[in-house]
Image (cartoon, rainbow, N blue to C red):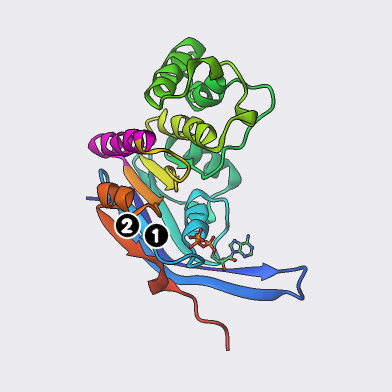
Amino acid sequence: MTPLLSVSDVAKSFTMHLRDGIVLPVVSGVGFDVNAGECVVLGGPSGAGKSSLLKMVYGNYGVDAGSIALLHHGQPVDLATASPRTVLDLRRDTIGYVSQFLRTVPRVTTVDVVAEPLVSRGVSRDEAQARARELLARLNLPERLWSLPPATFSGGEQQRVNIARGFITPHPVLLLDEPTASLDATNRAVVVEMIAEKKRAGVALLGIFHDEEVRAQVADRIVDVTLFAARKAA
Ligand SMILES: Nc1ncnc2c1ncn2[C@@H]1O[C@H](COP(=O)(O)OP(=O)(O)OP(=O)(O)O)[C@@H](O)[C@H]1O
């Protein structure tokens, strides 16, 4: 079976241009695959490079070496060397990302924030909004909030809007950066069930979960990022 996501020999260091060009090596030689229907969790202590790796896989951070191959409409595409235009195509159709914090756009209502990824894929506004309402109800977001922009919502409310937005599309690859960090037990359980549904639908998931109980429920495999700790340049 061809993996939906294949990371090979990826290396990354940060150069602090405002600090005399100090170079901070983060990871090197990173390699793992994620197959359809499995959830791979990035493990390792704080600072190991888990979030940085997720950002590389989404194309938010460039990589210094290696490849990040995604199966895009049946063809492998290397995100590490893809043009900005191709990265946008990959994000529309192939790879989704639930970041830890919602980036809010002023004046856009919660329903439209959630519906937007479907609208941009050509789904009618009415249908996309109906699907958005279903997800918001499932995540127990009070209905009185749906027509408001989420900028003033609580951390847990914003996180649920972010989850609804990330889960609304049928992307075959989905990245999750601590999607349950700000949630109560009831809503954590809803998200665990939504992840299980994605797996049953054949989605390849890659995530960070600090909550051990949630991790045990969702993880098929744990990739220990400390195995890829970059050695400091001599
Ligand atoms: N944009 C950046 N510029 C410079 N250094 C960065 C940047 N992003 C991350 N780092 C550094 O890279 C290292 C890995 O950070 P990262 O956030 O990926 O770790 P993590 O494993 O996700 O940690 P945590 O579990 O605490 O979220 C840290 O030492 C961090 O300071």
Dots 1 and 2: beta carbons under 8 Å? yes
Give the side of residue 78 with respect to residue 40, left or right: right
Q: Who is closer to the viewer here, 94 or 108?
A: 108
Residue drawn at 41 percent across, 38 percent down: 184
What is the C-alpha distance between the residues marked 1 and 2?
A: 6 Å
Residue 20, by quadrant, is bottom right
Taking the image as drawn, is residue 108 in sight?
yes
Give the image quadrant in which the ligand numbered 1 is located: bottom right
Q: Locate the C terminus by quadrant.
A: bottom right
| Ligand 1 under 8 Å from disc 2 Cβ | no
The dominant secondary structure in magenta is helix
Percent position of residue 135, x then y:
40, 23
Instruction: Provide the secondary structure element on which disc 1 rests.
Output: strand
Percent position of residue 220, x then y:
24, 52
**Residue farthest to the top, as pictured:** 126
Q: Which residue is mark 1?
A: 7
143 shown above or below 17: above
Instruction: Provide the secondary structure element on which disc 2 rests.
Output: strand
Residue 225, by quadrant, is bottom left
Q: Which residue is mark 2?
A: 33
Q: Earlier in the sequence, mark 1 or mark 2?
A: 1
Taking the image as drawn, is residue 39 in sight?
no
**Amino acid type assigned to the residue bearing label 2 in the image:** Asp
**Amino acid type assigned to the residue bearing label 1 in the image:** Val
110 shown above or below 66: above
Q: Who is closer to the viewer here, 75 or 107?
A: 107
Residue drawn at 44 percent across, 43 percent down: 179
Q: Which stretch appears magenta?
A: 186-203
Residue 169, numbered label:
none
Give the side of residue 16 with respect to residue 158, left or right: right
